[in-house]
Amino acid sequence: KEEKARKAAEELEAQKAALEQEHKERKEAVKNMNLDQKRQEELKKIEEQRELEKMTLAEEEAARKAAAEKIKKEKEEKARKAAEELEAQKAALEQEHKERKEA
């Protein structure tokens, strides 16, 4: 009887150890899953940040291009106005010269 009881106790201890090991492994697996999920979330955040930075850089580039285009148009407008002013002065001088000649 003692031998049976000892064997039964040993078997129970072995089952208990196996269950504890299984529990430990499951706990580790859950921990690893959580870490993997956290890593995935971090990678997603990093990717989102990169996309925002790309958008920001694209927006900055668009703003620079728009500013350059505005400056170019302003210069063209100034040049056009200066040319018109020169034409008007030239016409006035020609008219004045013509009037003097007729007088």
Image (cartoon, rainbow, N blue to C red):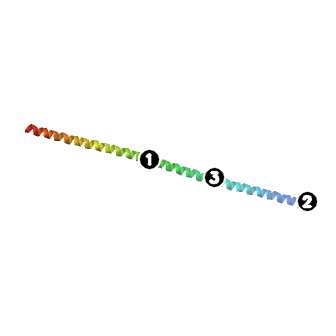
Q: Distance between the residues labelled 1 and 2?
A: 84 Å
Q: In which quarter of the image is the N terminus?
A: bottom right
Residue 89 position, x and y percent, is 19, 41
Mark 1 or mark 3: which is in front? 1
Q: Which residue is drawn at 63% across and 52% down?
A: 36
Query: Hey, what amino acid is under mark 3?
Result: Asp
Taking 14 as reference, is 63 above or below it?
above
| Mark found first going from the N terminus, 2 or 3 | 2
Q: Quadrant of the C terminus?
A: top left
Residue 6 position, x and y percent, is 89, 59
Looking at the rendered structure, the secondary structure element under dot 1 is: helix
The residue indicated by pointer 3 is: 36
Q: Which residue is drawn at 46% across and 47% down?
A: 57
Quick check: 88 left or right of 102?
A: right
Picture disc at residue 3 = 2
Mark 2 or mark 3: which is in front? 3
